[in-house]
Amino acid sequence: MSMLSIRSLPKEIEKALVMASKKTGASKSKIVKNALAQYFHLTEKNKRSKKLKKFFSTSSLTDVESKKLNAAMEIFNQVDKEFWK
């Protein structure tokens, strides 16, 4: 694992980092790692989100498949007026 040294860290960032460390009990290093992971979309939440987007994406369907899917789902757009009286 590589190391990173940040020089001339602005005072407001340093202050926020120290406050976050005290508030959460996490080390400043851990807070920076989490912030970088979130920035680069490498958090577990984002990994799950990408998998779900891929699973539910219709971009991988052909035009014919997409039309069939839309036709099959059309029933869900119909309102049963008798039921809602």
Image (cartoon, rainbow, N blue to C red):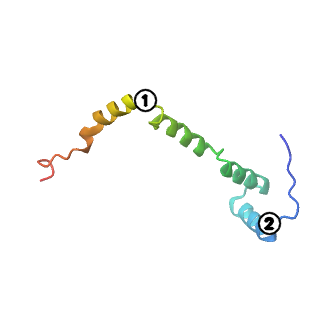
**Label located before the other in sequence (1 or 2):** 2
Image quadrant assignment for residue 7:
bottom right
For mark 2, give the secondary structure.
helix
Tag 1 near tag 2, CB within 8 Å:
no
From the viewer's perspective, is the residue at label 1 or at label 2 nearer?
1
Above/below status of 76 relative to 38:
above
In the image, is 78 to the left or to the right of 51?
left
Q: CA distance from mark 1 to mark 2?
A: 52 Å
**Percent x, y for residue 57?**
47, 37
- Camera-side residue of 74 and 14: 74
Q: Residues within 10 Å of mark 1 (few under 14, many from 20)?
A: few
Q: Which mark is residue 14?
A: 2
Above/below status of 13 relative to 59:
below
Dot 1 amino acid type: Thr
- Camera-side residue of 74 and 13: 74
Image quadrant assignment for residue 42:
top right
The residue where tag 1 is placed is 62
Residue at 34% from the left image edge and 33% from the top image edge: 67
**Percent x, y for residue 35?**
70, 54
Dot 2 amino acid type: Glu
For mark 1, give the secondary structure.
loop
Residue at 70% from the left image edge and 51% from the top image edge: 34
- Camera-side residue of 80 and 3: 80
**Percent x, y for residue 64?**
37, 29
Residue at 54% from the left image edge and 37% from the top image edge: 51
Q: Quadrant of the N terminus?
A: top right
In the image, is 34 to the left or to the right of 51?
right
Q: Which mark is residue 43?
A: none
In the image, is 58 to the left or to the right of 83?
right
Residue at 87% from the left image edge and 54% from the top image edge: 5
